[in-house]
Image (cartoon, grey):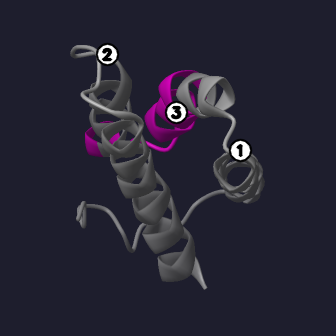
């Protein structure tokens, strides 16, 4: 898990954006929308992570999508689930 900066307070705008990105990811995951999961993970999570100064999360999101074709759907979903878990950990650390 990415624990660096977990206790850092987020601005209200970053907190709202975190909730939006996480909610969108969770919805795409529930509905099995792989294209949307890839888009959200690569663009929205990385953008949010960079604004929040969480470079390790930005790199994790990029690595979940870019290195090479995934061996299977399950392998792709496993990587995305890891990103979702990190976002949930950040959110739970804020409350």
Q: Residue at x 75, y 48 (%)?
A: 31
Q: Nearer the viewer, mark 3 or mark 1?
A: 1
Residue where numbered disc 1 is placed:
28
Report if the CB atoms under discs 3 and 2 are less than 8 Å apart.
Answer: no
Pointer 3 or 1: first along the chain = 1
- Mark 3, Cα crowd under 10 Å, few <14 / some 14-19 / many 20+, is many
Residue where numbered disc 3 is placed:
41
Is disc 1 placed on a helix, strand or loop?
A: helix
Outermost residue on the front side: it is 72
- Mark 2, Cα crowd under 10 Å, few <14 / some 14-19 / many 20+, is few
Looking at the image, is 38 positioned above or below residue 30?
Answer: above
Quarter where residue 16 is shown: bottom right
Numbered mark located on residue 66 in the image: 2
* Distance CA(mark 2)–CA(mark 1): 19 Å
Magenta-colored span? 41-56
Left or right: residue 58 compared with residue 30: left
């Amino acid at each position: 898990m990415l624990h660096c900066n977990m206790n850092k307070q987020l601005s209200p705008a970053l907190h709202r954006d975190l909730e939006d990105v996480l909610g969108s990811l969770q919805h795409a995951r529930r509905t099995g929308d792989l294209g949307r999961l890839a888009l959200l993970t690569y663009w929205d999570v990385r953008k949010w992570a960079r604004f929040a100064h969480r470079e390790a999360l930005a790199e994790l999101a990029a690595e979940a999508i870019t290195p090479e074709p995934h061996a299977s759907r399950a392998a792709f979903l496993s990587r995305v689930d890891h990103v979702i878990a990190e976002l949930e950990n950040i959110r739970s650390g804020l409350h």
